[in-house]
Amino acid sequence: MDPRILLIEDAEPDVFLVREALRQAGISGELTVLDDGEKAVDFIDRLDRDSNFLCPNVVLLDLNLPKRSGDQILEHMRRSRRCRDVPVIIVTSSDSPKDRAQTAKLGATLYFRKPSRLDEFMALGPLVRGVLGEEAKS
């Protein structure tokens, strides 16, 4: 079964890079992109209300978003009735130890700092593949 990936990212160039990293890692499937924090919270709430909607297999979450922060989204997701255990990879430009500690405390699975070099950004694909592989085993 193809994975369902939720990307919460407001920067179009980064959405493109994530798509490319997934493609290069051979990951196909459904990619849902939400470009602000309010849409992300609404999406999670809809998943909780309607069991016809399937939770994503993994969430890729930026921290700096319009309307709600990545921290707020992660906290909301961890309180979700249906999707609280979905792996969340933080994908952000922040290298702040405070951000790393806060997202770990909130239950982030991995933390990926957006690099400035394209080849380094492509390392995201294998990280996602590894998380999806763990999901398939559980």
Image: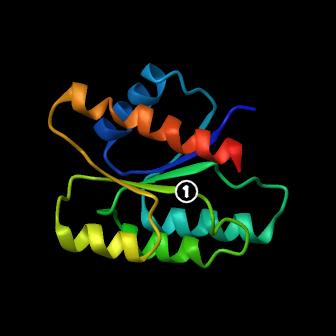
Judge whether residue 33 can be spotted in this image.
yes
Residue 67 sits above or below residue 39 on the image: below
Residue for point 22% across, 27% down: 118
Residue for point 81% across, 65% down: 50
How busy is the neighbourhood of tag 1: few (under 14 within 10 Å), some, or many (20 plus)? Answer: many
Q: Quadrant of the N terminus?
A: top right
Residue 2 % position (x, y): 69, 32
Q: Depth check: 87 or 116 in front?
A: 87
Residue 9 % position (x, y): 39, 51
Residue 27 % position (x, y): 55, 27
Color scheme of the displayed model: rainbow
Taking the image as shown, residue 73 lies to the left or right of residue 90, namely right
Residue for point 37% across, 37% down: 124
Name the element at disc 1.
loop
Residue 20 % position (x, y): 40, 25
Residue 39 sits above or below residue 33 on the image: below
Q: Furthest residue to the right? A: 52
Residue under label 1, please give it: 87
Residue for point 36% across, 51% down: 10
Taking the image as shown, residue 89 lies to the left or right of residue 17, namely right
Kind of residue at disc 1: Pro
Q: How many marks?
A: 1
Q: Depth check: 7 or 3 in front?
A: 3
Q: Furthest residue to the front? A: 137
Judge whether residue 67 can be spotted in this image.
no
